[in-house]
Amino acid sequence: MKFGKVNDPSLVDFTLPATHPETYSVLSRFNTNEPFEVYIGCAKWNKTDLKGFYPKGTKDELEYYAKQFNSIELNATYYNTPSKDQIVKWKEKTTPNFKFFPKITQSISHYSRLLNTDEKVMVFTDAVAMLEEKLGMIFLQMHENFKPKDFDRLAHFLQTFPKGFPLAVEVRNEEWFADQTIFNNYCQLLEQTNKTNIIVDTAGRRDMLHMRLTSPVAFVRYVSANDDSDEKRLNDWLDIIEDWRANGLQQLYFFIHQNLELESPMIATQFIQKVNTRFNLDLPYQGKNDLVLF
């Protein structure tokens, strides 16, 4: 992901900000005794981008990927709504507990800019519904020039989004975050419509690291800056997640990107291993089930 890329990551303060006070208010409504649902993965599975990830002779990339990780941020759906047949093929290639997190198509978010999109939304949700139990959470990513002046348009879209489809939202324009009143109104809208507020951790847009949850779900899009900061950044995230979990967090959806795609599966694997240890989980990761012969 090139969004938020900077020329010199060493100049960036990657310290995670404190949790927003309203996050604790949201989490307090939920029972910490419920099982912790965690999905961690990458943003793509194609061999062209994930160089060195697939063993020589791999016949099907998605089938192999789904044996290494339990989820994928499905950006393929952003370019066009796939056919139902294509969705079913993807579903059938994956392991039983695998989940897809599809991005809403650009014809809705970027070209139509949420105006008169009821029919397009129905086509999209009808398609991804074919994932059945493997549908995680749909997410809406707005163009960087979509501003708070169109708040009512966003509100209508969220209020009329089809029931039964969990939705997370990412706004990118700086105006959403610069004015506290605007940001609070936005978060209240997400709470009122039971939508999840996406957190983006990327070098060049620290304002999107708002730490404000609007549901018992933390949907985090983490962007590696291709430098040595990842280990500390991800360790800090472990502490934040542990705190949120202790206060009522129910689901964690965490996806690894890189400004320049080189090793996101390796970063995801290292993070999953630490999550498994910290939270006593048994999430899959690359190489976990490989046999070692002596």
Image (cartoon, rainbow, N blue to C red):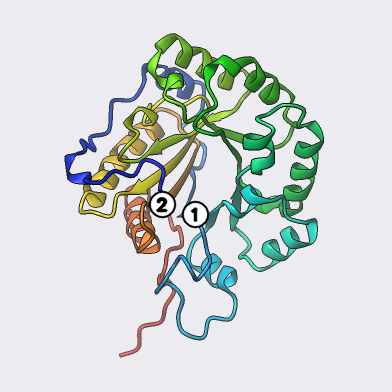
Image position, residue 33 (x, y; %): 48, 35
What residue did someone put label 2 on? 257
Q: Residue at x 64, y 42 (%)?
A: 106
Q: Residue at x 25, y 46 (%)?
A: 7
The answer to which quarter of the image holds residue 167 is top right
| Crowding at mark 2 (Cα within 10 Å: few <14, some 14-19, many 20+) | many
Q: Amino acid at mark 2?
A: His
Is the Cβ of the residue at disc 1 closer than 8 Å to that at disc 2? Answer: yes
- Inter-mark Cα distance, 1 to 2: 6 Å
The answer to which quarter of the image holds residue 90 is bottom right
Image position, residue 230 (x, y; %): 26, 50
What residue did someone put label 1 on? 43
Position of residue 48 relative to residue 44, above or below, is below
Position of residue 151 relative to residue 87, above or below, is above
Q: Is residue 127 found left or right of 200 in the rendered image?
A: right
Q: Is residue 97 found left or right of 245 in the rendered image?
A: right
View extreme (left): residue: 11
The C terminus: image quadrant: bottom left
Q: Is residue 141 found left or right of 265 in the rendered image?
A: right
Query: Is residue 124 shown to the viewer in this render?
Result: yes
Image position, residue 16 (x, y; %): 27, 33
Q: Amino acid at mark 1?
A: Ala
Position of residue 64 relative to residue 203, above or below, is below
Q: Secondary structure at mark 1?
A: loop
User: Which of the two residues, 244 or 104, is positioned nearer the viewer here?
Assistant: 104
Q: Residue 247, labelled with which disc?
A: none
Q: Residue at x 57, y 22 (%)?
A: 190
Q: Is residue 122 found left or right of 27 in the rendered image?
A: right
Q: Earlier in the sequence, mark 1 or mark 2?
A: 1
Q: Residue at x 77, y 56 (%)?
A: 83
Image position, residue 94 (x, y; %): 62, 65
View extreme (right): residue: 119
